[in-house]
Image (tube, rainbow, N blue to C red):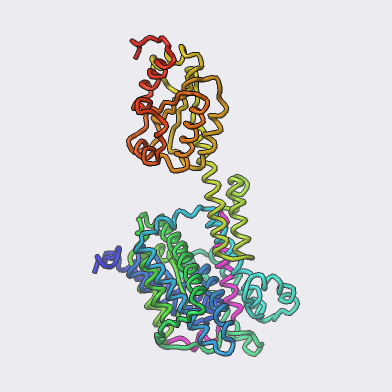
């Protein structure tokens, strides 16, 4: 059993029980609120928290992690749910079935990600891209909750919410606004000014209880929107529904869910590592999250991921093993089975206040605070991704951010590679040479050009290599020194081919020096060395210089080392 469940042991049972209880208390209002926001209903949020929370804890790779519906996953699910239910306005059940089938497919994709061991690549997403994306998700959540905070309906998209802002402020439902403000004050003020109270009763739960009590005691006849009747009992499994006409869109939506859920979970895993001083297993975590999301979709639950706030709360309360994460799910199940009637009176404005706090927490304020000192390129990437996330498309935002970051990285690597190129015709301090090598260059009086390259050569530096050589003239022998080059790619090998061809075209002799076995084998395979006689290829730089001296009939001190 301990081998099947990663990190399972029973030496911390008391801490795990308290951690699971505390995480469940925090998860309850968030699951309800995210279920409402998704459009699938509060019970879908609860089912998602229960199923993903349980199976991700059992099969995942981060022992202390608590999983369930998260802000980013809920935003995506809201878009998916709206997209497919709008296709069947007269048959919402079919649209909902398609949406939950997307959740199933997303879970299967996550399992595939884990089996293909691509967890390590997901963690390569640059921080400005993650920061911009999470900031955009936070802004979307805030924009979508402004309407419910004031007693209005939740808009389908953030752009629609922006357009409706004037209407929200001119048609305020005052009772809803008062309840929402109570929730906002509690979730922001309690952790800051009463941390001991927050530790005992997490502020989201406190806001839920006080806001609902205020509604029941003073505003029950005010027309304030509430959750209404919530189903109780165990969910019924439903087979996934596939419609070939919609399958391409469903696969695309599922890939978005899988990619976002994987990034969201692994980022939380890194947080858990920092707090617990442990190391998670990325690929196993993806498999666990995928199993949880697959089963959640079958039972009509929201997709989920590793939840940062719930994970940190769990660890601080003492939870360190999968027992705490699975126990949190069992507690939520018990609540669903017995407290549905009580939850029906929760005002939507209270949940909106709780979610606005979630939205502000998601925004990367630490990066924003460093905006004056952070590299401008990173800030541009972050702002671009953030704005595209809010107003264009979430995955397109990430794709554009990754392309921008990749081009920036390529430019920096190209600059570093070009800095590693030293072209000299006489000894200088840039390149350490032996006495014999210095003697040959001195006697050559500029007729030998030693073109020394250092570090891996990639396509980014290929054109620069050729341009730099074109800036030299007056030499008769070119020595391409690859002594410190561990790797050459196809494009840079073509650049070497052009350099050899251009030099020979103007009657320069070309020698190759110091190529390592792998580099030499690659150049031979690409037929780069066909232009050179075999005796022009030397294993050591000093041998190439001696050969150049013979070609030019240069006298030098052969006794020097």
**Residue 2 place in picture, x, y as percent:** 25, 66
Residue 164 screen position, x and y as percent: 71, 74
Residue 222 sits in quarter: bottom right
* Quadrant containing the C terminus in the rendered view: top left
Horizontal side of residue 32 vs 140, given as left or right: left
Task: Please state if 89 lies on the left or on the right of 98 as rendered.
Answer: right
Q: Residue at x 38, y 26 (%)?
A: 536
Asked whether residue 64 appears in the rendered view, the answer is no
Up-down relation of residue 239 to residue 256 (above or below): below
**Which residue is located at x 53 percent, y 55 percent?**
402
Seen in the picture, residue 479 relative to 255 is either above or below; the reply is above
Q: Is residue 43 above or below residue 124?
A: below
- Image quadrant where residue 487 sits: top left
Q: In the rendered view of the protein, which quadrant contains the N terminus? A: bottom left
What is the x, y in percent for residue 303?
Answer: 46, 73
Report whether residue 72 is seen: yes
Q: Is residue 180 above or below residue 193?
A: below
Residue at figure coordinates x 35%, y 28% from the top left: 534
Viewer-proximal residue among 375 and 227: 375
Q: Is residue 151 magenta?
A: no
Residue nearer the viewer, 401 or 348: 401
Residue at coordinates 40% horizontally, 10% vertically from top-left? 556
* Magenta-drawn segment: 338-366
Comparing 536 with 258, the one in front is: 536
Q: Is residue 347 magenta?
A: yes
């Amino acid at each position: 059993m301990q081998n099947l469940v990663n990190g399972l042991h029973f030496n911390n049972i008391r801490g795990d029980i308290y951690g699971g209880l505390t995480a469940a208390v925090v998860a309850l209002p968030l699951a309800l609120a995210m279920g409402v926001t998704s459009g699938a209903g509060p019970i879908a949020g609860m089912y998602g928290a229960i199923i993903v929370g349980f199976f991700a804890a059992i099969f995942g790779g981060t022992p202390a992690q608590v999983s369930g519906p998260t802000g980013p996953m809920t935003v995506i699910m809201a878009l998916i749910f709206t997209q497919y239910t709008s296709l069947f306005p007269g048959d919402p059940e079919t649209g909902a079935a398609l949406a939950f089938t997307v959740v199933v497919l997303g879970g299967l994709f996550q399992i595939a990600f884990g089996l293909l061991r691509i967890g390590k690549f997901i963690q390569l997403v640059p921080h400005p891209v993650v920061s911009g994306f999470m900031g955009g998700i936070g802004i979307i959540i805030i924009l979508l909750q402004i309407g419910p905070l004031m007693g209005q309906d939740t808009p389908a998209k953030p752009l629609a919410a922006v357009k409706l802002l004037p209407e929200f402020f001119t048609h305020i439902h005052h009772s809803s606004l008062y309840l929402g403000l109570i929730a906002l004050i509690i979730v922001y003020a309690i952790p800051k000014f009463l941390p001991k109270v927050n530790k005992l009763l997490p502020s989201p739960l406190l806001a839920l209880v006080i806001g609902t009590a205020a509604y029941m005691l003073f505003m029950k006849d005010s027309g304030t929107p509430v959750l209404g009747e919530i189903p109780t009992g165990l969910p019924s499994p439903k087979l996934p529904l596939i419609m070939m006409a919609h399958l391409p869109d469903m696969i695309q939506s599922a890939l978005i869910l899988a990619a976002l859920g994987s990034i969201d979970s692994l980022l939380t895993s890194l947080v858990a590592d920092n707090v617990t001083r442990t190391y998670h297993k990325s690929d196993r975590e993806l498999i666990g999250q995928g199993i949880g999301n697959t089963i959640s979709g079958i039972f009509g639950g929201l997709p989920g991921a590793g939840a940062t706030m719930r994970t940190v709360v769990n660890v601080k309360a003492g939870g360190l093993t999968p027992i705490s994460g699975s126990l949190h799910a069992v507690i939520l199940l018990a609540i669903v089975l017995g407290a549905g009637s009580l939850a029906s009176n929760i005002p939507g404005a209270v949940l909106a206040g709780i979610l606005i706090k979630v939205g502000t927490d998601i925004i990367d304020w630490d990066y924003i605070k460093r905006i004056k000192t952070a590299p401008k390129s990173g800030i541009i990437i972050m702002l671009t991704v953030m704005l595209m996330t809010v107003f264009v498309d979430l995955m397109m935002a990430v794709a554009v951010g990754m392309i921008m970051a990749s081009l920036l990285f390529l430019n920096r690597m190209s600059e570093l590679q070009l800095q590693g190129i030293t072209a000299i015709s006489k000894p200088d301090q840039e390149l350490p040479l032996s006495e014999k090598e210095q003697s040959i260059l001195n006697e050559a009086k500029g007729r030998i050009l030693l073109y020394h390259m250092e570090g891996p050569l990639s396509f980014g530096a290929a054109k620069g290599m050729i341009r730099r050589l074109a800036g030299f003239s007056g030499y008769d022998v070119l020595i391409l020194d690859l002594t410190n080059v561990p790797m050459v790619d196809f494009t840079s090998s073509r650049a070497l081919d052009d350099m050899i061809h251009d030099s020979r075209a103007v009657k320069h002799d070309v020698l190759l020096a110091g190529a390592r076995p792998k580099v030499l084998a690659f150049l031979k395979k690409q037929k780069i060395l066909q232009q050179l006689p075999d005796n022009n290829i030397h294993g050591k730089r000093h041998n190439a210089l001696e050969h150049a001296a013979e070609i030019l009939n240069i006298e030098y001190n052969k006794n020097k080392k």
